[in-house]
């Protein structure tokens, strides 16, 4: 933003100098700036920096709001699981724009999740019809949105993206299609982690199965190449996931 604005500042000052009086030109015949020109330049630079800071603040604000909402959803789900005596799931839809998530209630406490649900399945090459026949899609039909929490899916802010979701039920980090965290009537929940990204940084929110504590961490990019490079962001997310998995 700053690089693209410097020519604008220079052009603005050049146009301004065309209207200077002859006397002023004589005083500054070596190409120096008048006091007014310097003040204008300082104002424009401050304005650019303020706009850049505002963009950065907005990204962190949206990121924090998303992290807070995920934590709130899980806490709400724990209470609902006990109240309804039913399994609750926090379901993330990762392959849509914008990405979405929802809190849903399912069958009663006698329902058992099939082991096949947690086997690694590559859905990247599947068409829509094939995805509907996966085990995850079949299980999804047994769950309904908790209207007390939301009437429709929660959408992520435009500048926030979920890179991956991890759980003690899955061997690998899930990066596409759908990922779910389950909460049980006993108060237990899946141990999990969600890793998100903005143009400024990565962040993770993780939790354990039996405690009510949440751990939030931020990871600044080491260089500007990370900003639009999803592959490098994913590599960093996999490192974070790997360390979390060993805990």
Image (cartoon, grey):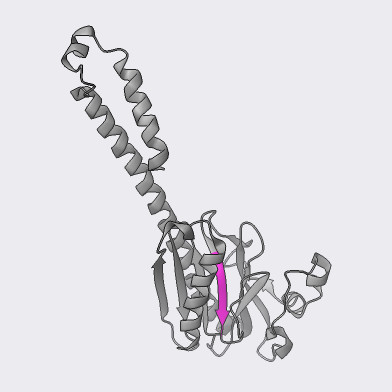
Magenta stretch? 162-167
Q: Quadrant of residue 19?
A: top left
Q: Where is residue 135 drawn, in percent x and y?
A: 76, 80
- Nearest the camera: 111 or 100? 100
Q: Where is residue 85 drawn, in percent x and y?
A: 61, 85
Hey, which residue is sitting farthest right in the picture? Answer: 129
Q: Which residue appears at 24% of the width and 9% of the height?
A: 21
- Nearest the camera: 152 or 79? 152
Up the image or down, 54 lies above or below 37; here it is below
- Nearest the camera: 136 or 12? 12
Q: Which residue appears at 35% of the width and 39% of the height?
A: 48
Up the image or down, 34 lies above or below 82; here it is above
Q: Quadrant of residue 84?
A: bottom right
Is 124 on the left or on the right of 205, as rendered? right
Up the image or down, 129 lies above or below 57; here it is below
Q: Which residue appears at 20% of the width and 20% of the height?
A: 30
């Amino acid at each position: 933003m700053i690089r693209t604005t410097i020519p604008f500042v220079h052009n603005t000052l050049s146009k301004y100098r065309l209207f200077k009086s002859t006397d002023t030109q004589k005083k500054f015949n070596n190409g120096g700036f008048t006091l007014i020109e310097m003040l204008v330049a300082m104002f424009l630079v401050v304005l650019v920096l303020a706009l850049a800071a505002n963009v950065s603040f907005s990204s962190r604000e949206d990121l924090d709001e998303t992290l807070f909402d995920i934590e709130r959803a899980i806490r709400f789900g724990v209470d609902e699981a006990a109240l309804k005596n039913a399994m609750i799931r926090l379901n993330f839809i990762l392959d849509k724009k914008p990405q979405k998530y929802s809190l849903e209630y399912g069958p009663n406490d006698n329902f058992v999740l099939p082991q096949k649900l947690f086997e690694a399945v590559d859905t990247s090459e599947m068409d829509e019809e094939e995805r509907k026949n996966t085990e995850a899609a079949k299980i999804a039909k047994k769950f309904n949105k908790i209207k007390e929490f939301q009437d429709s899916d929660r959408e992520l802010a435009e500048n926030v993206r979920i890179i991956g979701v991890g759980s003690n039920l899955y061997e690998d980090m899930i990066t596409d299609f759908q990922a779910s965290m389950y909460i049980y009537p006993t108060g237990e929940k899946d141990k999990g982690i969600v890793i998100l990204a903005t143009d400024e940084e990565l962040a993770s929110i993780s939790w354990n199965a039996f405690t009510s504590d949440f751990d939030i961490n931020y990871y600044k990019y080491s260089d500007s190449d990370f900003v639009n490079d999803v592959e490098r962001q994913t590599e960093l997310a996999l490192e974070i996931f790997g360390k979390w998995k060993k805990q």
